[in-house]
Amino acid sequence: MPEITLTAEVGRATGSRATRRLRKEGKIPAIVYGHGTEPLSVAIDGPALRVALTGESGTNQLLELDTGSDRYLVLARSFQRHPVRGTVQHVDFQITSRDEMVTVEVPVVITGDAVDVRHADGGVDQQLFTVSVSARPGSIPTSLEIDISAMVIGDVLRVADLDLPDGVVADTDPETAIAVAHAARAQVLEAEEEGGEEGAAEGVGEDGAAAAGESGEGSEPTES
């Protein structure tokens, strides 16, 4: 994954007033930390950051911050957003290197058509939408695909079924369900109702037999 270079202005003033002024100028306050470096306060151009993090790699995009005197290879690790507008208000950048393993969340994408499930009027529900993986920054996949074409009703695809690229390790429990193939809801309800009726009928039969037994024990022969 090639990095995208962003200009990082150092020496920004801190405090709420200075921060508001930065945001009015279209800049986003940020902190750069990691690898034994003292936390560094910087300002990033807002539109440039949005473009960088809305590409194919999303927020896992590898970035290079250029301060003029230094360059830092980083990943955006934490965002503070406006509670109403949802715009980014602050970013934490973690310094990394191309040789170290990092842990990130990667989207899971379902592909294919579960024909057998569809023909049975069933459906496939996606249960998990991201998977935590460990990889070197340059090997982070943009997404992980899982094919549901061979599924039949009752099948479950799990994290263990993912085809992971070389150098990528899943940190999520391998038994965690990603996709579940189920029967049509009407069929499920019908089966539940039939099961309830059968249980009720069995209960009535047992109660009736018990009642008959009790009445027989308590009766005496009638004199003629």
Image (cartoon, grey):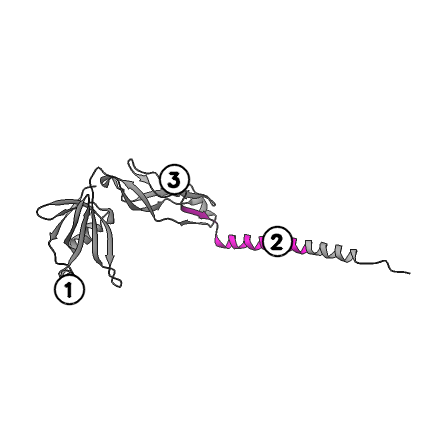
Front one among 182 and 43: 43
Q: Which residue is mark 3?
A: 160
Residue reaching furthest right? 224
| Quadrant containing the N terminus in the rendered view | top left
Q: CA distance from mark 2 to mark 3?
A: 38 Å
Give the amino acid type for the residue marked by disc 1 in the picture. Arg
Where does label 2 land, which residue?
A: 199
CA separation, marks 2 and 1?
70 Å
Seen at 78% across and 55% down, the residue is 217
Q: Mark 3 or mark 1: which is in front?
A: 1
Q: CA distance from mark 3 to mark 1?
A: 50 Å
User: Residue type at mark 2?
Assistant: Gly
Dot in front, 2 or 1: 1
At x 24%, y 52%, the residue is 78
Q: Position of residue 127 (x, y in %)?
A: 39, 49
**Residue neighbourhood size for the residue with mark 3, other residues' Cα within 10 Å, grouped as few (<14), some (14–19), many (≥20):** some
Of pointers 2 and 3, the one earlier in the residue sequence: 3
Residue 46 visible in this rendered orientation of the protein? no
> x%, y% of residue 208?
71, 56
Q: Is residue 30 visible?
A: yes
User: Are circles 2 and 3 on residues that touch, CB within 8 Å?
Assistant: no
Return the residue nearer the eye: 180 or 18.
Answer: 18
Q: Which mark is residue 17?
A: 1
- Residue span colored magenta: 178-204
Q: Where residue 113 sits in the image (x, y, percent)?
A: 39, 45
The quarter of the picture where residue 133 lies is top left
Residue that lies at the very extreme toward the left in this rendered image: 69
Which kind of residue does numbered mark 3 sit on?
Ala
Q: Residue at x 61, y 55 (%)?
A: 197
Q: Main secondary structure of the magenta part?
A: helix
